[in-house]
Image (cartoon, grey):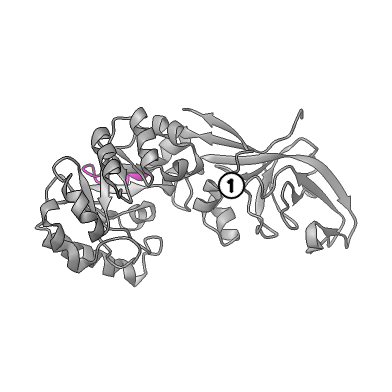
Amino acid sequence: MIEPNSELIIDFELVRKNIQEIKKRLPKHCNFMGVIKSDAYGHDLKIATNAIKDVVDGFGVVRLDEALVIRENSSKPILAMQGVYSTDAYNLLKQNDIWSVIHSTLQLPLAKQYKNNLIFWIKLNTGMNRLGINLNQLNQFKSFFTNQNVLMTHLACADNPSDELNKIQLQNFENSWSQAKNEMKRSVLNSAGVFNFPEYSYDWVRVGIAMYGGLDLPNLKTAMKFRSQIISIQSLDTGQRIGYGGRVKTKKPSKIGIVYCGYADGFPQTAQDGTSVIVNDRLTEILGRVSMDLISIDVSEIPDCKIGDWCELWSSDLPISENAKKNNLISYELMTKMSNRVKRQYLNI
């Protein structure tokens, strides 16, 4: 061990395998949009674009500057998923052949000026009540009812297929598509939707978190390995307290490994005792409060554990979704909160 550091090792072969696994659930005619917003969910926007551009049919982002980075690296379709709001931005879309979402009637006057130059996705509010035009406003978009444009919505509860809101949203969408005279292409499903409602795949699916293995879904692997090294081992007697606040007291003689990582690296400060980690291929757990730079783990049952050994906080062998579930978080947040001080390695790019 020369100089310890937390590390993020991202294996894009796992991302590509996840994509192929997801595609098995889709009809052949359905296009796959890889969502790489928020710096590709922390996986690096430019590197992700180049690594997956041959296995996706298009890219989805939120920020226009993200779309421009992708365009420098791929000729595939790009969708600005929250649209743009100025003439300058629309001119950039036109110059770079970037598609745009319209989710509000306030966007309509400007969008009409470009309706012959761009492909538009019209977003419906079918019940999520976040973004999207109201169902009774769809007639105002008649000039966009063409077989080049796309009618879309977003399911609020796709990860819970028994939730009645799914049925309401899907029915509202079907009614609206009929109102559009069945002329537009359709897009409804996100990552969870592909697994729970594959019969609604239609023309495009928009898959983000599942590509990176961030959901607890069949045959998907977390592509991001987050790890750091043990820099100290404490031998404690029964009844000794651990970490800030001393919230944990040893129930027997114990060995505690101190991992060179903390919330300043992006690991959640709120992580609970019992959160799983891996050391030397052995599963163990966090004990005590996570501090800015250090995490305490129980290595009592890992007799070969020594200073310099690696501790995996999540990886393909320890899904990020397990950490998220244990701590009442979501894997999206964990992926996108990685600190700049964490060293990055990219495999199979």
Q: Is residue 179 magenta?
A: no
Q: Disc 1 on helix, strand or loop?
A: loop
Residue type of the residue flagged with mark 1 = Leu
Q: Residue at point 25% right, 62% down?
A: 133
Q: Is residue 120 left or right of residue 45?
A: left
Residue nearer the viewer, 138 or 347: 138
Q: Quadrant of the N terminus?
A: top right
Q: Quadrant of residue 198?
A: bottom left
Q: In the current view of this chain or complex, which residue is farthest to the front?
A: 87
Pointer 1: residues within 10 angstroms few (<14), some, or many (20+)? some
Magenta span of residues? 22-32
333 or 255: nearer the viewer: 333
Residue 54 against residue 282 in the figure, above or below: above
Judging by the rendered image, the residue that carries numbered circle 1 is 318
Residue sitting at x 48%, y 36%: 44
Q: Position of residue 213 (x, y in %)?
A: 47, 46
Picture residue at 40% right of the left edge, 29% below the top: 50
